[in-house]
Image (cartoon, helix red, strand yellow):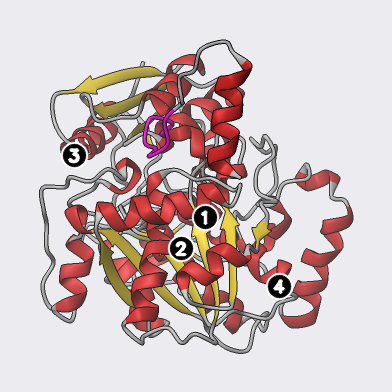
């Protein structure tokens, strides 16, 4: 039976952590309240989201050496490009729920760089994770923590990728999963993943933001363990996109990191990863983060334009389904990340997104539409003079091409079964 969780009372470990700021665990990003790392709470009473604090004391060369040594082989981390960085992730010991994930490539293609307008551009392709998106990085940490805490059922709201990832990791862990999706708004490939992995898929007659409200209510009242990016351990796993990228670059940070921005978990995670990396001596300077939204789902962009003095909410609509979110849950954390890295927020049209996707696809790499927002945003920022043509840039591709296979400009060419037909086509492409 799913049990409602009751907050601890006075004198509990919750209250003791309030008076013990030197103890690692969870901390409210708004008021500073501290909780034990094993607390099932995801949100502070003040309304702020909780954030994890690394427990390891390793720093500088010793920490780099530990990470680099595991590139050659790491049985304890199961070859995972996430758990390689475990000193900065989840405290404690225990079994891991890992496929494994991570170890995604940095791609350089001259045609893509020319189109964007910068010479030094690499594409970090998170679509190479086990279920085809970056979500696996956060899910391995969050599901591992949930299992250690004795979770009896896992849940999320999703535009597609989160549901696919949660379903896969829940199946591996042997824990039931419920995923809440907006009706007729999830790409077939993503929906098929969640169904095939065995999740209980609930199609809600509402948009994503209402789905998230419902699943948060269900987690509070029915004892479900929520696995959206409101969960602090999701953010910890997603930090490793940046840590792995820095390691691939010999711990030399780029000038800019471009990231598609929907619910803003990655924007928050990237800022947290960079600040922690600098504090622990892994890097000497912070790259600037550029969070790129689709113009039809750009509340964070409007808030940025207003100097973050006002939080905007919109009715989201865009071809980039993975970032079709009108009220991003990680708003405060993401705004802090933009401030800390002197970052920017941009919005690109669906037309710009599809043009960028065609360039990435045409380079033999491929990505889902939301991923292409990072490249479209880069091109816009170069043309506006915000990103310099000589700056070094890493653009993150968040999902695989097959996540949204129906979104393509190319179409098959019908021909009769005759050699002359093949010859005619051949003449047209040579």
Describe the element under mark 4 as helix, strand or loop.
Answer: loop
Q: Quadrant of residue 40?
A: top left
Q: Earlier in the sequence, mark 3 or mark 4?
A: 3
Count residues near mark 4 (Cα–Cα under 10 Å), then give few for <14, some for 14-19, many for 20+: few
The residue that mark 1 highlights is 238
Gap between marks 2 and 3, in whole Å?
Answer: 22 Å
The residue that mark 3 highlights is 213
**Magenta stretch encompasses residue 408:** yes
Q: Earlier in the sequence, mark 4 or mark 1?
A: 1
Q: Nearer the viewer, mark 2 or mark 4?
A: 4
Q: Main secondary structure of the magenta part?
A: loop
Is 199 left, or right, of 33 in this rendering?
A: right
Image spot of residue 68 (x, y percent): 81, 66
- Above/below status of 342 relative to 208: below
Residue 9 seen from this side: yes
Count residues near mark 3 (Cα–Cα under 10 Å), then give few for <14, some for 14-19, many for 20+: few
Taking depth in this image into account, of 122 and 261 the one nearest to the observer is 122
Residue at image x 61%, y 45%? 430
* Mark 1 in CB contact with mark 2 (< 8 angstroms): yes
Gap between marks 4 and 1, in whole Å?
Answer: 18 Å
Q: Which mark is residue 249?
A: 4
Is 297 left, or right, of 200 in this rendering?
A: left
Q: Which residues are magenta?
A: 404-411
Residue at image x 68%, y 74%? 57
The residue that mark 2 highlights is 269
Q: Earlier in the sequence, mark 2 or mark 3?
A: 3
- Above/below status of 10 relative to 394: above
Q: Quadrant of residue 1?
A: top left
């Amino acid at each position: 039976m799913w049990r409602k969780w009751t907050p601890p009372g006075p004198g509990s470990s919750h209250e003791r952590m309030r008076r013990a700021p030197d103890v690692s665990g969870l901390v409210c990003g708004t008021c500073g309240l501290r909780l034990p790392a094993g607390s099932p709470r995801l949100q502070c009473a003040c309304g702020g989201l909780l954030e994890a604090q690394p427990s390891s004391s390793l720093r500088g060369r010793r920490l780099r050496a530990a990470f680099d040594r595991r590139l050659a082989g790491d049985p304890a981390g199961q070859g995972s490009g996430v758990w390689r960085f475990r000193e900065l992730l989840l405290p404690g010991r225990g079994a891991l729920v890992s496929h494994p994930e991570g170890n995604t490539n940095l791609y350089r293609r001259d045609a893509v760089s020319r189109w964007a307008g910068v010479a030094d551009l690499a594409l970090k392709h998170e679509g190479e994770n086990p279920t085809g998106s970056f979500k696996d990085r956060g899910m391995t940490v969050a599901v591992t923590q949930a299992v250690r805490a004795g979770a009896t059922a896992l849940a999320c709201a999703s535009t597609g990728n989160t549901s696919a990832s949660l379903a896969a990791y829940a199946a591996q862990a042997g824990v039931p999963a419920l995923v809440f999706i907006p009706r007729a708004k999830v790409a077939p490939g993503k929906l098929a993943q969640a169904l095939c992995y065995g999740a209980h898929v609930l199609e809600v007659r509402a948009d994503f933001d209402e789905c998230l409200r419902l699943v948060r209510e269900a987690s509070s009242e029915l004892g479900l363990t929520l696995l959206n990016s409101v969960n602090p351990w999701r953010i910890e796993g997603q930090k490793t996109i940046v840590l792995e990228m820095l390691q691939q670059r010999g711990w030399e940070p780029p000038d800019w990191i471009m990231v598609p921005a929907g619910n803003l978990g990655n924007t928050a995670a990237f800022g947290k990863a960079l600040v922690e990396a600098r504090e622990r001596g892994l890097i000497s300077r912070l790259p600037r983060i550029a969070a790129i939204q689709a113009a039809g789902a750009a509340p964070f962009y409007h808030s940025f334009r207003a100097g973050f003095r006002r939080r905007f909410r919109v009715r989201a609509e865009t071809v980039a389904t993975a970032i079709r979110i009108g009220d991003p849950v990680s708003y405060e954390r993401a705004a802090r990340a933009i401030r800390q890295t002197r970052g920017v927020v941009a919005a690109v049209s669906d037309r710009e997104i599809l043009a960028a996707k065609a360039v990435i696809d045409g380079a033999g790499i491929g990505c889902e539409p939301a991923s292409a927002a990072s490249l479209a945003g880069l091109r816009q920022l170069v043309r506006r003079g915000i990103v310099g043509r000589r700056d070094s840039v890493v653009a993150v591709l968040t999902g695989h091409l097959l996540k949204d296979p129906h979104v393509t400009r190319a179409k098959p060419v019908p021909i009769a079964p005759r050699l002359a037909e093949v010859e005619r086509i051949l003449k047209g492409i040579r």
